[in-house]
Amino acid sequence: MVYSQDPQNQVDAVVLGAGFSGLYMLYRLREAGFSTRVFEAADGVGGVWYWNRYPGARCDSESVYYNYTFSEELFKEWSWSSRYPEQPEILRYLNYVADKFELKPDITFNTRVTSAVYDEAANRWQVKTDTGETVSAKYFITGVGCISSANVPNIPGLNDFEGQAYHTGHWPHEKVDFTGKRVGVIGTGSSGIQSIPVIAKEAAHLTVFQRTPQYSVPAQNHTYTKEFVEEVKNKYSEIRRQMKETVAGLRFEFGEQSVLDDPPEVRRQKLQEGWEKGGWEILFTYNDLLANEEGNELVAEFIREKIQEIVDDPETAKKLTPDHFYGTKRAIVDTDYFETYNRDNVRLVDVKASPIEAITPKGIRTTDNEYGLDALVFATGFDGMTGSLFKIDIRGKDGVSLKEKWENGAKTRTYLGLTTAGFPNMFMLTGPESPSVLGNMPATIEQHVEWVSDCINHLRDNQVDVMEAESQAEEEWSAHCKELADATLYTKTDSWYTGANISGKARGFPIYVGGYGAYREICDDVAVNGYKGFSFKQV
Ligand code: NAP
């Protein structure tokens, strides 16, 4: 179905973004008979998987969980090639979904929404785009992603560099050939750690500019056999259940014991098994890794020892050894990351010890050296959680902007991470104060999309025109999120979760840490109890 060409340009819903969230939201709304427009800045579907085309980009959730489960037919039609497939395969999957359900005709590509303003008299959202279009919608739904607003640090001389510069989150579509080049990579988060081993194999020389060393655990990636893929398809119901009920929408629950319960040799054996299985096994081995300083230190020390064992040069190994709490920055899984520093053509520069002073026409100057480079890769991350929302001028009742209400990010206030008071009929898919990034994104996206579409159906069935979060419910939800987060170690580490990566950004932890399964129950309970915490208006 193509959206209705209403002369007033009116639709039931406008959805922002054609990634995992926006595609499924469109599907659900259309199935329920709501006219829907999706706006997407890119010229194709995929969201982060459209933009993040850097070498080595792949998911860090196991692929069999990194997909939709709303359609059993879709789940059984698609076969993943490996445990952690690369970006092109994930983008192919999202295109397959969009084509299978004929979603693309309802998506307006190459179009960025610049503002969305709530018109209280009409009870509608007026949505404007950078192509000059204005659309009036009853419901305004954001699916803009939590980590989609690229952060390029404001280093002096940024524009003086004469070589090629790239950000991992805005990688060119055509292959970037580093053959014979001296390449510099700034940043050692997930994007840096995935790309560094691949770039090192191609470049003549690679210099890694590291500010904070990271824990990383082998992905133990491997291709799937035909038999395994068939087995997975037969486990559709079980996988869907796990994605709905577990703490992170994966096959894991946290272990039953405290890190401190195990004697050293048992703990070591369990961690060794986790290391060999790879991925996030270690993170979920114990029940208090993210809350117990002493226990976290024991696990962190295990990984530090691995780094010392893998990296040949003791000085480099020392520089690569982190000292923050393990898991409080997004836990990273890699393929040959630490091994890469044993290559002759790779050098590590500690820019905490010798900060970057400037980017020069020929490379990077730190306080103690100058590094000649032909190409520069910014693996410097994103303005997470609020960055993409704040790029749009979103205004609710009385013309108050979301940015003002949330005090420029210093005080996000939401009800359930889905809605915010003063912004009626607006929903944020994987918004701040939902569990979103603390697990497997497709699982949390499906839950949000299903809750929102059920909610909108409920409003229609009950002839309700306007729904708005109550301030009291919102205060309580935000306080609950803060209380849970403050009881963990997450808030003690500088990370993009806490906003510490963006200069001038207020520190917070706008993510619900109680787990996907528990969060789903809370949301379901709100719905079953007549959407408690919301006010309703019939016009
Ligand atoms: P990130 O985790 O924020 O890492 C950015 C890196 O750049 C950090 O090492 C940071 O150092 C460094 N940096 C930032 N500004 C700098 C500056 N001015 N000078 C020197 N270094 C600077 O970003 P990311 O690696 O893009 O990952 C972001 C998130 O995206 C991940 O945590 C993950 O959730 C998601 N992601 C997932 C995958 C996947 O496996 N599916 C892949 C990529 C990304 P500091 O640590 O000191 O701030």
Image (cartoon, helix red, strand yellow):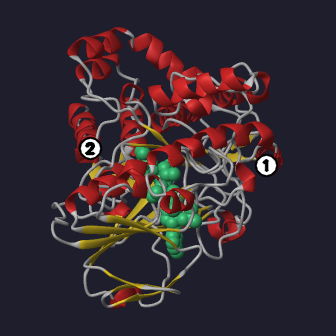
Image position of 357 (left or right of 235): right
**Is residue 462 visible in this depiction of the protein?**
no
Residue 215 point in image, percent of width and height? 55, 48
**Depth order, front residue of 410/306:** 306
Label 2: element kind: helix
* Residue drawn at x 26%, y 87% as measured from the top left: 162
Q: Give the class, few, some or many, for how many residues have Cα within 10 Å of label 2's Cα (few <14, many ≥20).
A: many
- The amino acid on which the numbered mark 1 sits, given as a three-letter code, is Lys
Ligand 1 is within 8 Å of the C-beta of the residue at disc 1 = no
- The amino acid on which the numbered mark 2 sits, given as a three-letter code, is Leu
Calculate the distance from the C-alpha at mark 1 to the C-alpha at mark 2.
35 Å
- In the rendered image, which quarter contains the N terminus? top left
Residue 153 point in image, percent of width and height? 49, 76
Which quarter of the picture shows residue 213? bottom right
Question: Label 2, on which residue?
Answer: 91
* Residue drawn at x 55%, y 79% as measured from the top left: 354
| Mark earlier in primary sequence (1, 2) | 2
Q: Is residue 523 above or below residue 204?
A: above
Residue 126 point in image, percent of width and height? 48, 63
